[in-house]
Image (spheres, grey):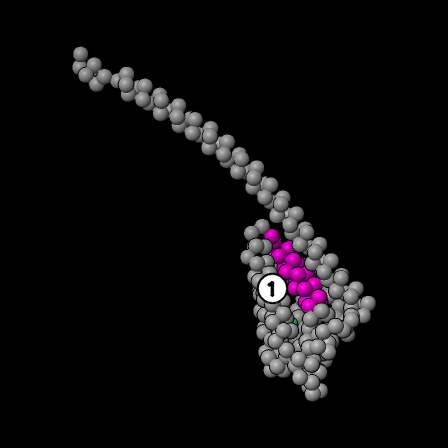
Amino acid sequence: MFIWSNKFETKLDLVDTQHKNLFDLMNKLCVHIKNGTKSDAELDSAIRLLIHYSKTHLHDEELLMQDSQIDNRFFTRHRMEHNSFLYDVDRFSEFSTSDDSSTDKADKIVRFIAFWLIFHILGTDLVMAEQIACIKSGMTPQQAFETVKDQKLDSVTVKMMLDAVMNLWMDSKNAHANLEEKYKGLEIKCKNLQEKCTDLESKIQTVLVETIDYESDFRPFDLYK
Ligand SMILES: [Fe+2]
């Protein structure tokens, strides 16, 4: 379960509502994953909804930044983070389909989205919210950018971000180990196949040689002698 904290609040109604909805969707999925209360098809559909809602949320955040005329340096970096997330989520959907059960796949995607989101809210969305607040109070986007860019994070926020990064890192390490294991298995299968091919080639060669020998010994006219 992923606990909502007031540390995540940006004080932007749309953003906070969507972030809370994302937590809600992820926690409902966690319960179903733990209790096994959804069929594979239902789990897949719940994941698709979560991914779709995440994408909609990121798009809405970008529109909000554009409407607020936030400094382009920040907008570009923020959008790059969103694009990196979208890329990873799509790759997740492609790669975890092969061997993973729907439950494993759901678990991995939920964990990735949750820890990415926690890190992103604390490290980037809150900075966005502060800049938007500064712009609303009369600063230019450039002044807002300069004002908030060097602000220090409190120790609780830093710890929450570190926890999120550690979880992302551990999951990525496990995924890497699984891939390595699968690669080794494929290497062994490939080697066995190569050996069978060599064996088959030599059998074909033997049969061919025997056939040629038979044909060279065969004299059709001998039959009529
Ligand atoms: Fe964001």
Classify 10 Å Cα crowding around label 1: few (below 14), some (14-19), many (20 and above). few
**Front residue of 193 and 150:** 150
- Magenta-drawn stretch, dominant element (helix, strand or loop): helix
On-image quarter of the C terminus: top left
- Residue 95 visible in this rendered orientation of the protein: yes
Magenta residue span: 100-120
- Residue 19, image x and y in percent? 68, 73
- Cβ of mark 1 under 8 Å from ligand 1: the answer is no
Residue that extends furthest to the bottom in the rendered view of this protein: 138
Count of labels shown? 1
Residue 9 falls in image quadrant: bottom right
- Residue 115, image x and y in percent? 70, 63
- The residue located at (31%, 22%) in the rendering is 212
- The residue located at (82%, 67%) in the rendering is 155
SS category of the residue bearing label 1: helix
- Residue 82 visible in this rendered orientation of the protein: no
- Residue 157, image x and y in percent? 78, 68
Residue beneath disc 1: 84
Residue that extends furthest to the top in the rendered view of this protein: 225
- The residue located at (66%, 54%) in the rendering is 172
- Image position of 57 with respect to 209: above or below: below
- The residue located at (53%, 34%) in the rendering is 192
- In the image, residue 110 lies in the stretch drawn in magenta: yes
